[in-house]
Image (cartoon, rainbow, N blue to C red):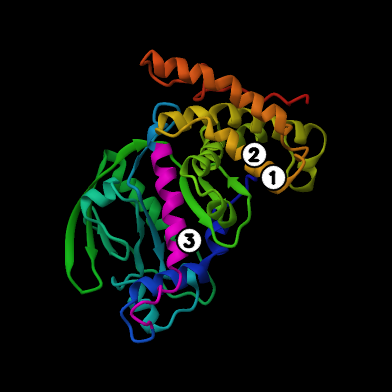
Amino acid sequence: MDCRPNPIHSRLSRPWLHLLLLLGLAMAAAPLHAANETPAGSDIAALDLRVATLGEALAVAAHGLCSGPVARTGMDLHSRAQYGRLTAQQAAAMFPAANGVAVLLVVPGSPADRAGLRSGDGLIAMDGVPVPVTAASARPDYASTRDALDRLDAALADGVARLHVRRSDGSDHQLVLHGINGCPTRFQMDPGGGFEALADGLYVRIGQTMVETAADDDVLAASIAHELAHNILHHRQRQNAAGMRRGLARMFGRSAALSRAAEAEADRLTPWLMARAGRDPGAALVWLDLLQSRIGPSAPTHPSWARRRAIINEQLPLIAARIAEERSLDPPFDTINPGPLVPDGE
């Protein structure tokens, strides 16, 4: 886990790739594409949607295990400013609403999907309040996207948001969005990223190579669930409270021990999150095998591979027993008030 201080950077690292995917989706019928040619960026869009879909299911199924649940929608937003300079044609294709805020993706079967929202819809107003205009920016700036997401969360505080959207054909629609309770984390695929997966308390980011390599959704769900576990267990805050140092200092002494403790806790929760979401919890072991084969020896910030497998293996019969007895899949440890983080002595 790499708890970075600001989730904005996860989007700023990917503006040109999202620009390609959105232009490809918005302009697929333009003459510059042959009829049988895959639009630019569509692979990135599919990977992004795959991570969002698995993450959404895990976050909703984890409801009851996290403090401060939120109304989840199964969609992500983006804004004109996060891409830096855009031509007038590009801006019009990507953002049909003149304010420059639009729906980036919609998870199939999610509340946003059921409400009729589509990728590419321009977002004009929420609960009758206009969405502020996103000014063009010379350099990528995620602040407008973050503001729009925060406004959407606020509109959904009572569980329902009334959205005014504009489609690329110029038609306006009034849609009613009903949120569903889940844990408060946003999920992103990091284009160009490797096998790293990062959690910072608000976001989970999974490297593109991991998404492409983990062909089995259960295996990819294990990677996402592990990072979601970090956020549910408030590891960033608890590490800070325990005096953990970051950067290169995290590799040594007490800081490394605090990092290992968090990783062990996340491993323990991972199979429970998977089982609650209908995924095979045993796939977490396949995920560890994949990581070890690609990464090699474990770092001092993580428990040994053997110990990580042992931690997960300890949970599997407990989960199987709960399923056999048709009992709720609540882990036998506190996830809402886990207490101070104790340095790992491995």
Helix, strand or loop for disc 2 = helix
Please say whether residue 149 is visible from this viewpoint. yes
- Dominant SS of magenta comes to helix
x then y, percent, for residue 157: 31, 41
Please say whether residue 333 is visible from this viewpoint. no
- Considering every residue shown, the one lying at the far top of the view is 325
Q: Is residue 247 left or right of residue 153?
A: right
> Contact, CB < 8 Å: mark 3 with mark 2?
no
Write down the residue under mark 2.
289
Position of 40 relative to 298 (above/below): below
Mark closer to the observer (3, 2): 2
Helix, strand or loop for disc 3 = helix
- Considering every residue shown, the one lying at the far bottom of the view is 31
| Cα–Cα gap, marks 1 and 3 | 38 Å
Position of 134 relative to 201 (above/below): below
Residue at x 63% of width, y 24% of height: 311
Label 2 sits on what residue type?
Asp
Write down the residue under mark 3.
143
Helix, strand or loop for disc 1 = helix
| Cα–Cα gap, marks 3 and 2 | 38 Å
The answer to which of marks 3 and 2 sits earlier in the sequence is: 3
Write down the residue under mark 1.
293
Q: Residues within 10 Å of mark 2 (few under 14, many from 20)?
A: some
> Contact, CB < 8 Å: mark 1 with mark 2?
yes
Label 1 sits on what residue type?
Ser
Counting every numbered tag in the picture gives 3
Q: Is residue 62 magenta?
A: no
The magenta span reads 33-59
Q: Nearer the viewer, residue 151 or 253?
A: 253
